[in-house]
Image: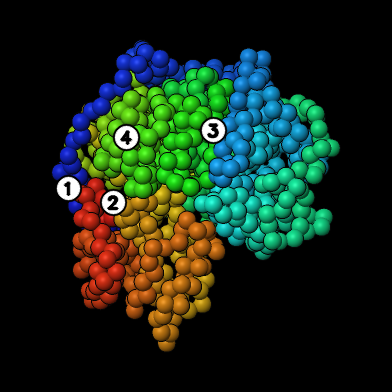
Amino acid sequence: MAKEEEAVEVSEAQIAVHWREEQYYQPSAKFVGQANAADPAIFERFKEERFPECFKEYADLLTWDAYWHTTLDTSNAPFWKWFVGGRLNASYNCVDRHLAGSRNKAAIIWVPEPESEETKAITYQDLYTRVNEVAALLRDFAGVKVGDRVTLHLPMVPELAITMLACARLGAIHNQVFGGFSGPACGERIADSGSHILITMDGYYRNGELLDHKVKADQAVARASQDGVTVDKVLVWRRHEGQYASQTPMIEGRDFFMNELLPTYRGAVIEPVSMPAEAPLFLMYTSGTTGRPKGAQHSTGGYLAYVAGTSKYYQDIHPEDTYWCFADIGWITGHSYIVYGPLALGTTTVIYEGVPTYPDPGRPWRIAERLGVNIFHTAPTTIRMLRKVGPDEPSKYNYHFKHMTTVGEPIEPDVWRWYHDVVGKGEAAIVDTWWQTENGGFLGSTLPALQPMKPGSCGPGVLGVYPAIYDENGEVVEAGSGRAGNMCIRNPWPGIFQTIWGQPERFVEIYYRKYCRDKASTDWHDWPYFAGDGAVQAADGYFRILGRVDDVINVAGHRLGTKELESAAITVSEVAEAAAVPVLDELRGRAVEMYVALKPGIQASKEIEDKVSMAIETEIGKMARPKNVWIVSDMPKTRSGKIMRRVIAGISNFTDVGDITTLANPEIVEDVRHHVQSEKVARGEVPRELTTQEAAEIRAFGQAE
Ligand code: WTA
């Protein structure tokens, strides 16, 4: 690691010392009285001496076709295997086994975005029928077999959950790509996963508009084919029966309407395929340190056990609850805590199609009131937005949450308090759950009835998970020291992803190389998991997550890799070099700013700035659109030619740029600063002063490259 980057570490740690401690909040007696985990004996059951056998308790929430013989097999470290010898089917566990007791209870309640359209309840019986019919279609019409990858690019409709469960029923690996991703981004993920089937929908509602979604399927198929993978069939769900929401034609022999094929499979029953516990259940692509997205591969047994267990204890889900997780199923939160966890526990899960503020900021609370939602789960970005546009709306509606979750980004204590006092009406227990796509389920959280809440901190490690903060030399940063370091997990857990699809070396390199004590070891103690987040641990053991230490920018909970943004920017022919940095954003947490240098002889223009924004929207998706594109004469660089992102991140955020004496071109820093900051002043875009926590994050940005 270069000198100038070491210097950053020290200052980051010093900054941390000045953080203010927040007051604890206690859950209500009413909540504690009904909680799934209310007896402190649970901590005994999950203490480190009981690892890994403690996780039998989670696995026993599932129905197994064959019980496992080995809880954790570490022989091929760090490719951990959980519940080895066990067999099960995820769709059976989420659907069939609930029929006997809950046949006519709602499994899914779907709320379309237009309020004029009817809310639909899908009972467990309906879900069973529909999953079977879709599984029959996939098997007999599309030829889907065990182990095949099937890419889904679906919006927030029940067909998404149904299609996932149908794949799981067949032992096929679903690969849902977030609906907001562009066609080309979907195509890259199709190619990387080697899928020959794409399942999409003609259109969906977003902010009052019926979007054409099928058009993206055509672009996706074209990109996949450029990348060497042919899509044989595109299966298209229809948003409205008998109508077609897209402008693009259906391609003869390739594109088929699901709704037209399904009658052939009416009443079909497909035996769930009994899968080994360690068979992959799905891929979830996420961003990382290179331009190529990483397909996090999740297992069947370990994953399902982990999401069922954490849903039960941390989400406090009881079968009679009405649970609403306001995330997108296209992200890991939706897979684990809209679909698999809640359905494995046989509860009612709500799926909402649209945006939180459509048609007005009272919408979520109307939905909660009408459906009797009692568990609510969302991200800080949504909370910030609802607070901004409708701070008094919750009090106008008669709903009562017993429990609420925040996930995906650090939450400011102030925002947390609004969530608690206004949304939760002071009644709901809150969990701030820290985890990642790679993790399958929660890693850091309070156990809601047993550990008090502290705004801005996720809490300690969850049951059976033992985190530690390490410094750059692998020494533990002690709780209460006030120093920041790298968030790590010392042990494996059942929800951990199995590998990066097709790139096992990168899996080891990114997550395990940094702190591995002995590459030849098959003892899990030698393989701490490196999460890529900076954190500090208070004396009470609670962790406060600072944000990414690698080059990932978390925009409104969407993980964007700087390399992906930069590759998109340089598809613009005038651009020679590009760098992406995070900038503080009051609503989205962070936004992206792009810095670009042009090829020799090309004049800066608004047109080029717009082209860069468009290129990012086309290559990745609208959610990645930069807040600003700055055309600069040169980038601050190290002597080895590396762009110093932390320097430009400092400029964008009006914070200290740190030591620049070791740069190859220190004189450029003042030029760029003047250009960008005077323009920002003119536009009224000067951010509020950063908290020490935020400043530490900006200074650490790009450090782990
Ligand atoms: C961040 C989302 C603070 C973190 C489940 C992590 C959080 C990244 C929290 C993973 C939280 C997630 N507090 N930061 N409660 N939860 N993060 O893969 O930086 O989309 O590494 O998974 O989000 O994002 P991902």
- 303 sits left or right of 249 in the view: left
Instruction: Say which amino acid is labelled 1.
Output: Gln
- 684 sits left or right of 442 in the view: left
Q: Position of residue 382 (x, y in %)?
A: 40, 44
Give the mark nearer the N terminus: 1 vs 3: 1
Q: Which residue is mark 1?
A: 14
| Residue 401 found in image quarter | top left
Residue 422: which disc? 4
Q: CA distance from mark 2 to mark 3?
A: 35 Å
Q: Which residue is mark 2?
A: 697
| Discs 2, 1 touching: Cβ within 8 Å | no
Q: Residue at x 31, y 22 (%)?
A: 27
| Residue 518 found in image quarter | top left
Q: Residue at x 66, y 35 (%)?
A: 162
Q: Residues within 10 Å of mark 3 (few under 14, many from 20)?
A: many
Q: Secondary structure at mark 1?
A: helix
Badge 3 residue CB within 8 Å of ligand 1:
no
Q: CA distance from mark 4 to mark 2?
A: 29 Å
In front: 72, or 262?
A: 262
Q: Residue at x 41, y 32 (%)?
A: 397
Instruction: Say which amino acid is labelled 4.
Output: Val
Q: CA distance from mark 4 to mark 1?
A: 35 Å
Q: Secondary structure at mark 3?
A: strand
User: From the viewer's perspective, is the residue at label 2 or at label 3 nearer?
Assistant: 3
In front: 518, or 411?
A: 411
Q: Position of residue 376 (x, y in %)?
A: 43, 32
Q: CA distance from mark 1 to mark 3?
A: 44 Å
